Amino acid sequence: MIFNFTATTRFYFFREPVDMRKGIHSLYHLVKTLGKMDALNGNAYVFVGRTRKSIKVLRWQKEGFVLYNKKLELGCYTLPQQVDNAPFFEVESIILDQIVNSIKLKSNSNELRLKAMITA
């Protein structure tokens, strides 16, 4: 995984597209008010933009928030299936890794999937 998380970190996806201009405070507000979750617990909260070209991960680390941001120049992210209508749903770290490292490119005749090599 490209992010530096511990084995005990839990990952929660926000089910709606988010305005990627939002920063730490606005994303924290979504976690606290809509998700009714404690963003200060060390879990990671994942947000994806409307076009699925950007992904942000918000996490509290010891003395402050960290906001990871990855924006694709080509392609878009493939999102996981939602199991209910809750504002946030949990995904395993391996699923997040597949989302971040699998990029869906559109071509004229078909759709291609590029998978990043995961080195152990």
Image (cartoon, grey):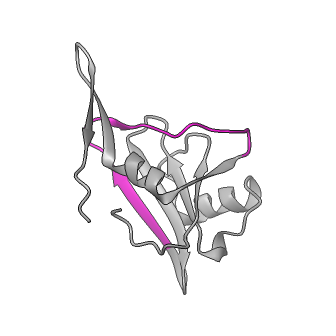
Q: Is residue 96 magenta?
A: no
Q: In which quadrant of the rendered view does residue 29 lie?
A: bottom right
In the image, residue 28 lies at what x, y percent? 63, 63
Q: Is residue 114 above or below residue 3?
A: above
Which stretch is magenta? 66-86
In the image, residue 103 lies at what x, y percent? 31, 40
Q: Is residue 100 above or below residue 24?
A: above
In the image, taking residue 8 as reference, residue 108 lies left or right, namely left
Q: Which secondary structure is most common in the magenta stretch?
A: loop
In the image, taking residue 44 as reference, residue 110 lies left or right, namely left
- Furthest-front residue in this view: 120
Q: Is residue 83 magenta?
A: yes
| In the foreground, 9 or 67 | 9
- Say how many tags the image has: 0
Q: Residue at x 59, y 58 (%)?
A: 27
Q: Residue at x 26, y 56 (%)?
A: 118
Looking at the rendered image, the quarter that the C terminus falls into is bottom left
Q: Is residue 25 above or below residue 74?
A: below
In the image, taking residue 31 as reference, residue 94 lies left or right, namely left
| In the foreground, 94 or 3 | 94
- Furthest-bottom residue in this view: 63
| In the foreground, 19 or 46 | 46
- Furthest-top residue in this view: 109
In the image, residue 71 lies at what x, y percent? 34, 49
Looking at the rendered image, the quarter that the N terminus falls into is bottom left
Q: Residue at x 43, y 38 (%)?
A: 52
Q: Is residue 60 above or below residue 56?
A: below
In the image, residue 69 lies at what x, y percent? 39, 58
| In the foreground, 73 or 100 | 100
